Amino acid sequence: MVGEKKWLPYVLLIPWGLGFIIFKFYPFLNSFYLSMFKKTSPFTSEFVWFQNYARLFNMDDYYGEQFLNSLKATAIYVVFAVPLVLIVSLLIAYILSKKIKGVGFFRTSFYIPTVLGANVAVVLLWRELFESYGLMNQGLELIGLSQANWFGTPAGAMTTIIALRVWQFGSTMIIFLAALKNVPESLYEAATIDGASKIKQFMVITVPMITPVILFNGVMRLVETFQVFTGPRLITQGGPINATKVINMLIYEVAFQNRDFNLGSAMSWILFLIIMVFTVAIFRSSRYWVYYSD
Amino acid sequence: MKKGLLFSLIFILFMFFIGCDSSTTSFNSSIPTISSEDVTFSFSWWGTTDRNVATYQAIELFESKYPQYKISGDQSTWDGYQTTLYNRLERNREADIFQVNYNWLYSMYGEYYFMDLSELGIDFSHYPEMEHDPLTINEKILGLSLSETGYIFYMNKAVYEEAGITEMPTTWDELIQAGQTIGGASGGSKYAIGRLDAQQVSILMFSYLSQKYGKNLISSNNKLNFSREELEEGFAFINTLRSNNVLIPNNTNDTHTNGPTNPNWVIYQNYGGILQWNTAVSEYENELPDTSNLVTLGMFQQNEGEELGMYKKVSMALAVSKRVENDPAKQQAIKTFIEFITTDPEAIRILGVDRGVPSHDTAYNTLLNSTTTDFTSTREWEGHVIVQTLFNNQLEEDINLYIHPYYEHDVFRRIYEMPIEKFLFNQDTAAQAINEIINKFDSTLAQVMGG
């Protein structure tokens, strides 16, 4: 009976495997191959080794400057968005882990933005909220403040797209919530007997006990945040003055609008390497700050 | 049960492969079969509702007069049209005839993808002399000019009248005086023009410098034609406009976005003017509560009576897919269609000025002499007259301000627009902006031109 079933998992894996090979693995390898060429006409390309990569680090080249600018914009976005998502989701998860009235309703409410995702409709809604006559500015006027120029200044535009990312903290929160439920109650009881305050308990019991989940959420959000596209593309179009033109927007512009898939592929590979370096660094550092109770 | 599951899976995979196999799913299989004498060809364009409606009506009329021909129309908005077209060209899936921007002939490898229109047998003598020079690459005419366009000023006279100005300024000095008057009367909240984006300020500055120095932005050997000192003068002039209530002093001061829906233009009417292609003014005009307040002004001049500073280009053109080169029946059908929309009086009147004032002499004269609709009173027509008058006047003075085919190239345009945008947001000083432009202008132009 068991022997007869051996082939079944492999058969069931075939659709996923095909999808993975066709839509992920092959394009992944092919993009590296493409990054070594330069288009000389619509039908001919020239093998140029790493010339496309060199262009991206040459500040005299238009794309070198653009690439550096996009790296800066992406770095600002990641530096603010990732910690904020983690902090907000952990705090909300902590509150929702307590026995409070209507907790189910709040959990659902906080999770809804994530279910909706950063799709076009949500992004457009976000744009309306922060628009000159949007709810945000109406609210500011209501409390006697002047309108804010959300999309018109580099700082305002970046704040808006970071806020959109932070707003979608639901899935991070749910994972934190599950982790918080697994922290043994006995630790809190002992700490209470020893006179530790709630804040002290949170800092010395809760946070250390859930560090594996903080690591997981941190890495996942980092990878995801580096690849942001929809929000900046639809809300700010990368402006003003390219302040929100994150790297994925530049890749899209180069590859799909200017039809330079070679240079676009080189940019994608550099983005991949950056994400990999950060991910490896976080994993390497985890031995110093992640606590595995088992 | 297990066998059933296995067979189901194999069936799904089989169907998946069948679905992926392009050889078994013909692209053309959905096209209804027609008799050998009939020809169906596709036509794609971008446009607003007015243009779409007019185009479909013209197609319907064409099909009724030439029942052997059928046109598959493919309308689109401006946004995304260029990307989609480029993508289709690379996959050999473009329409048989399609609308293009003049600079795309160069940036999209037009020689490889577009058919030489002289092979279609079109009579180009009906077009103004040299009209098709910019659309000709290596002696191949790759685009059929529909109309020409230039940037001109349109003013909201309500803003001026509110400040007691009854006569519209025509020189830059008068414009600055008007700005001071409007600013004074409104406590600084209203402007003679208002907010312009980097693209508009670029052409404003280049027009101003061209009036002063009698030369095009880009030289005949594809280099920046203005010196550092001349650019300094241009930026100083923009600063003068910003400090005299002509333009807003800092683009961050306006909490609204650029464009025709800006409430300072539409609702508050704080802005007294715009600078726009004469073929696209309707998007600003239609937003105004009272369109009769819009005045077609033209280009401000250094001195009274001068007619200078007009850059122009082909507004849009029609290109034919290179695929059609091997299909004589389609060539004939497309030629018939092009001749129809440029010579048939009914079709010409239907299409009107939705693609600008037509360049073809028959179409032009038909609209000019139309007794049913007065096309000459449209903003497009008024603007067209100004553009052509100023441009031709410049030619007489040996100044050719025809827009370089790479001026609007997606990469190249950022070389001058981005420093100007930073300047408008007070992020860069004039000196920094000029340095940026000078440092990258020639090299980037050479790069995008394939040099």
Image (cartoon, coloured by chain):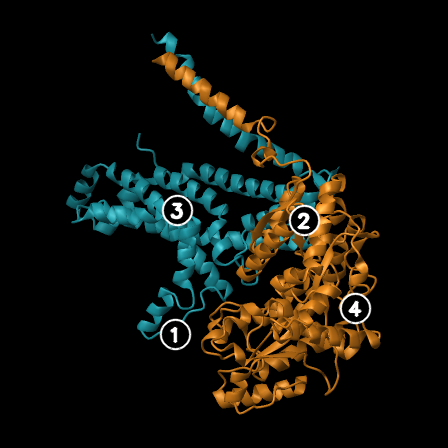
Chain colours: A cyan, B orange
Label 2 in the same subunit as label 4: yes
Say which residue label 1 marks: A146
**Label 4 sits on what residue type?**
Asn
**Label 2 sits on what residue type?**
Ile
Using the image, name the chain to which the residue with label 1 belongs: A
Label 2 vs label 1: CA separation?
52 Å
Residue A41, by quadrant, is top right
Residue B296, by quadrant, is bottom right
Above or below: residue B324 compared with residue B264:
above
Q: Which is more foreground, mark 2 or mark 1?
A: 2
Say which residue label 2 marks: B97
Q: Which mark is residue B225?
A: 4
Using the image, name the chain to which the residue with label 4 belongs: B
> Badge 4: few (under 14), some or many (20 or more) residues near its Cα, within 10 Å?
some
Q: Which is more foreground, mark 3 or mark 2?
A: 2
> Badge 3: few (under 14), some or many (20 or more) residues near its Cα, within 10 Å?
some
Above or below: residue A237 compared with residue A178:
below
Label 1 vs label 4: CA separation?
45 Å
Say which residue label 3 marks: A117
Label 3 in the same subunit as label 2: no
- Is B380 displayed left or right of A155 in the figure? right
**Label 1 sits on what residue type?**
Ser
Can I make out residue B403 in this image? no
> Badge 1: few (under 14), some or many (20 or more) residues near its Cα, within 10 Å?
few
- SS at circle 2: strand
